[in-house]
Amino acid sequence: MSTAATIAIPEFRVYSGTQVRGVLRERRREVVEAIEAAYVAHGEDETVNPDSYFLRFPDRSSDRIIALPATLRPGSGRPATGLKWISSFPGNVNRGLARASALLILNDEDTGYPVACMEAAAISATRTAVGAAIGLRELLADRLEPATISLIGTGVINHHVLQYLDLAGVTPRRILLFDRDRGNAAAFIAALPARLEAEASIATSAGEAIAAGEVVVFATTAAEPHVTDASLFEHRPIVLHLSLRDLAPEIVLESHNVVDDVDHCLKASTSLHLAEQRVGHRRFVGHTLPGLLRGHSPPGDDRPVILSPFGMGILDVAVGDLVHRSLRSGCPPVDGFFFDATRF
């Protein structure tokens, strides 16, 4: 007879997108703290964040579904384990749908049983935007507040970025937009929150927007570099390169580069990966976001500064854990989800 202690089967809960968005909206500061803590834990080797796994379709090269498993270990302060399963189907935009949809699964730390499943598109967009805002805050430490923010791409991610600019102490006087679909850009302006109190306009080209912005944010669906003119960056802006594949290797190599994780960012044909293939080394990456949060000096302003965060699963898990802890007491578990969890 087994002498192992008997423990209760974990309860399993499901949280809707409406519930998740409520937590993200009401616990904004805690979301930021969770993401900062996850970055710091990663810098202290208190995470396990394997490579993302890309499921691709031979007949649809632009579509993909990505699995991001991750765990925050006990030394991180709040252990949590899970998996984000996120699809990216750019053609959805032409159908009037968001490009990305996602689920997040959390697992019990003792048994490994799944304990929560939640809609995670908002978690994914929020952690991307908050990470960008945190990075911008660190990079602006010794600089004047930027007056003009240029957004290349007018989708969900850049909409979320604007919601969190205040975390970086930034209240822009001007927002300049560019999107290949001018109708999307116009709809984006119409949806801007009134509290931003910034003049918003649409640029005639990506080059015009880049050259005008002290901070330039790329959040596009580009699969390969489409910005090749390094002279557009002569004014040495801070570039939040969230979509990772917009910039030609020459621009990367002429800039200070900041990443969330070197190994994650230099793969999958990102602009940094292409730059590595061009020169045969990684020495052009001099800073990491976890390092900046742990007190390392930011790059200087003698060159453009490019922050390229690959977006790690630990961030999704950290925010998902906050959502689960916030909602579980008021959300009944799914009855009989584990039909029979006993061994015999």
Image (cartoon, rainbow, N blue to C red):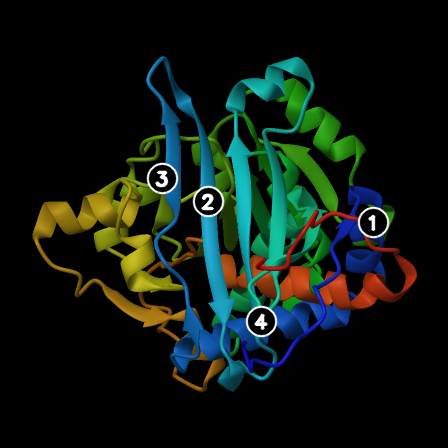
Q: Which residue is mark 4?
A: 109
Q: Which residue is under mark 3?
A: 245
Q: Position of residue 291 (x, y in %)?
A: 40, 78
Q: Amino acid at mark 3?
A: Arg
Q: Tell me how far mark 2 sits from mark 3, CA to CA.
A: 20 Å
Few, some or many C-alpha atoms within 10 Å of disc 3 (few <14, some 14-19, many ≥20)?
Answer: many
**Residue 197 in view of the camera:** no
Q: CA distance from mark 4 to mark 2?
A: 20 Å
Q: Amino acid at mark 2?
A: Ala
Residue beneath disc 2 = 67
Depth check: give the residue in front, 195 or 99.
99
- C-alpha gap between disc 4 and disc 1: 21 Å
Marks 2 and 3, the one that precedes in the sequence: 2
Helix, strand or loop at disc 3?
loop
Give the CA separation, mark 2 to mark 1. Answer: 27 Å
Q: Are marks 2 and 3 in contact (CB under 8 Å)?
A: no
Residue under label 1, please give it.
335
Residue lying at the far left of the rendered structure: 280
In the picture, residue 95 is in which quadrant?
Answer: top right
Identify the amino acid type marked 4. Glu
CA distance separating discs 4 and 3: 36 Å
Q: State the CA–CA distance, disc 1 to disc 3.
A: 45 Å
Q: Earlier in the sequence, mark 4 or mark 3?
A: 4
Instruction: Tell which of 241 and 38 is nearer to you.
Output: 38
Evaluate whether residue 18 shows in this view.
yes
Between 261 and 331, the one nearer to me in the picture? 331
Circle 1 Cα neighbour tier, 10 Å, few/some/many (<14 / 14–19 / ≥20):
few
